[in-house]
Image (cartoon, helix red, strand yellow):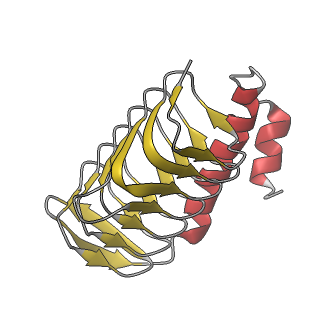
Amino acid sequence: MPHIGPNVTLNEPAFIHDTALLYGKVTIGAGASVWPYVVTRAEMHEIVIGARSNIQDHAMIHVGYTSPTLIGEDCSITHRAVLHGCEIGDRVLVGIGATIMDGAVIGSNSIIAGHSIVTEGTRFPENSVIAGSPARLIRQQDNSETNLLNARFYLMNALNYAQGIDRCSQEDLDTLENGR
């Protein structure tokens, strides 16, 4: 059974795994998913996870001392990512093992490469490809379609997992491929 604290607001998420630990003031949007061993802690400020966003296995989301953590819609926060008091725009993919620190702002349609470290207060515009430690802007390109496709894939998985189905059918994959 997951731990869902008394200050957590669930707005019809698609799936929350049994090992998730959600503490403090956390709002999870419609169609969002929270996967195995995710931990959220918001003792002060708040964490907001936008509609259809997915928080993948072993991700850790905390608030900062002076800032909430805000995640837009249709985002993928991938395995072992750490978000700490930052703001993530819509349709952003945060790569495996990436860390985003207090006061950082990531514009919509961006990709943060795996294992990148976005330092405190760093701001990146929309349509950024970000990589490194410390992270820097590699190039600008609109990543909205690929990021949205990844979010839709996780929504499909979440709806399946909520029904006890842990494999995609060919029909699922065809539907995803055709954008329906």
Residue 138 position (above or below residue 167): below
Residue positioned 38% across, 32% down in the render: 58
From this viewpoint, is residue 141 visible? yes
Q: Where is residue 64 drawn, in percent x and y?
A: 25, 57
Which residue reaches farthest left?
Answer: 134
Which quadrant is the C terminus positioned in?
bottom right
Residue 131 position (above or below residue 3): below
From this viewpoint, is residue 168 visible? no
Q: Where is residue 84 drawn, in percent x and y?
A: 28, 54
| Viewer-side residue, 144 vs 86 | 86
Q: Where is residue 111 drawn, in percent x and y?
A: 41, 63
Residue positioned 70% across, 52% down in the render: 30
Q: Is residue 107 left or right of residue 154?
A: left
Q: Is residue 41 left or right of residue 131?
A: right
Residue 16 position (above or below residue 7): above
| Residue 110 occupies quadrant | bottom left
Residue 56 position (above or below residue 42): above
| Viewer-side residue, 161 vs 139 | 161
